[in-house]
Amino acid sequence: MTNAAVKVCRWISRTRGVCRRRDAIGVALGLILLLTSSSEAQTFTVLHQFSGGTDGENPQAGVVRDAAGNLYGTTLLGGSSDNCLFIGPGCGAVFKIDANGDETVLHSFTGDPDDGAYPFAGLILGEDGSLYGTTFGGGGSNNGTVFRLSNSGQAGILFAFGVSDGANPFGGVIMGKNGTLYGTTQEGGAGDSCWSGCGTVFKLYKAGNETVLFSFAPPATYPTAGMTMDTTGNLYGTTSGDGGGLGTVFMLKKNRTVPARTLYTFGGGAGGQTPHGGVVRDARGRLYGMTYLGGDVNNCIYSDGYGCGVLYELDPDGKETVLHTFTGPPDGALPYADLLRDEAGNLYGTTTFGGAFGYGTVFKLDKHRKMTILHSFANTDGATPYSTLIQDDVGNLYGTTFYGGNFTCGPQYGCGVVFKITP
């Protein structure tokens, strides 16, 4: 079993309570598939159910959409390779779903030195039509990669991480000027304060040269999300604090001549803790995000007294305001992903658990802080969404669920789905 496989399995066990032993934990099945599940009128549609194997299995991240309406994403497991059998069949895949709902696997990762394995993060679409993303494992030292998939289907590694230059990226990349990529690694970097480094912020030039912009140290440890960039080039992100501290929100200046500035340190309780998702920024410099835990620590059945998570706002001075505290049923619990913010100031997101049936929700928080559940997953239509949502020009929402849907991957959990919500 490879080092990357051990890390992936450890992470899945910690956050899901299972690592490929899907028959060990029973969940109630036979729930009805709902087409709508909120006080507002919308239609929920499953665009694709993954079936495991070469088709792909368990999408952790969301999707991106091109001008023709095609959707692109990654699955953590599945694909045609047999190199990653400890966790599941395959090392993950890149997929495309066209406007008719037909799926094509564009690339199956192999975990070889010249390829990646286990893509936790989603993709970005370059101006030339190429797709860019990260893998948690693979590469020469099996510490993860940044990859490019050309519009002709040619896959290649842009950079393979070691340890001092970062290791095991969970988050994806964003693109700045001249095709420069920015992202985070969950581990690696300078210093030995953590088991194998506390994580980094990196910059990858178009030619493939990488620069570590910042190496984290306690209490700011283990960034699991990608970055947000403002119009001047400043970078914003979060650290989960898993294993050291309870998480932070940070900023890295455009000139990178000073260390990253901690904008806020989570303290648990009502203010939240352990943000796995990143932040989005509005025109006034306010940041919005969610924490996986914290909030009402007395009324969450999913976290043994740590709370179901919160949705928060940070003003430019670093003052936190909790906009919503999750409680489990009926509004959701344990939100993992980034938020989506539309031009009107509405916030959209997913929770991994809770809702009407316990399998997670899609929600909307309007600018008046009114929470609306757009959909509660019932397992047969998907379960446990870890993905960030995207929105098209007419307001349709798209996302993925890690479990649920087609149960060929296991009688209780399912292989995951890609869904659409039409307002």
Image (cartoon, helix red, strand yellow):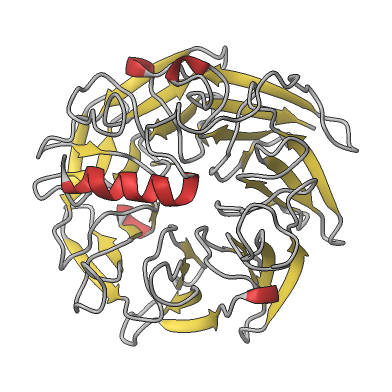
Observer able to see residue 370: yes
Residue 147: x %, y % from top left = 25, 42
**Considering depth in this image, is 177 or 122 the residue closer to the camera?**
122
Q: In the depicted view, which residue is nearer to us: 302 or 280?
A: 302
The x and y percentages for residue 227 are: 44, 61
**Quadrant the N terminus occupies:** top left
Measured along the vertical axis of the image, is residue 88 above or below residue 329? Answer: above
Q: On the image, which quarter does residue 68 sit in?
A: top right
Instruction: Single out the residue that lies furthest toward the right.
Output: 39
Residue at the spot 90% in from the left edge and 38% down from the top edge: 39
Residue 362's place in the image compared with 206, above or below, is above
- Residue at image location 37% in from the left, 50% down from the top: 11
User: Does residue 421 appear to the left or right of 180 in the view shown?
Assistant: right
Left or right of residue 240, residue 385 in this image? right
Q: Nearer the viewer, residue 155 or 47?
A: 47
297 relative position to 132: left or right: right
| Residue at x-position 50% and y-position 59% | 276
Query: Looking at the figure, which quarter contains the C terminus?
Result: top right
Q: Position of residue 358 (x, y in %)?
A: 69, 39
Q: Quadrant of residue 120?
A: top left
How many numbered tags mark residues here? 0
Q: Position of residue 385 (x, y in %)?
A: 58, 39
Res 419 → quadrant = top right
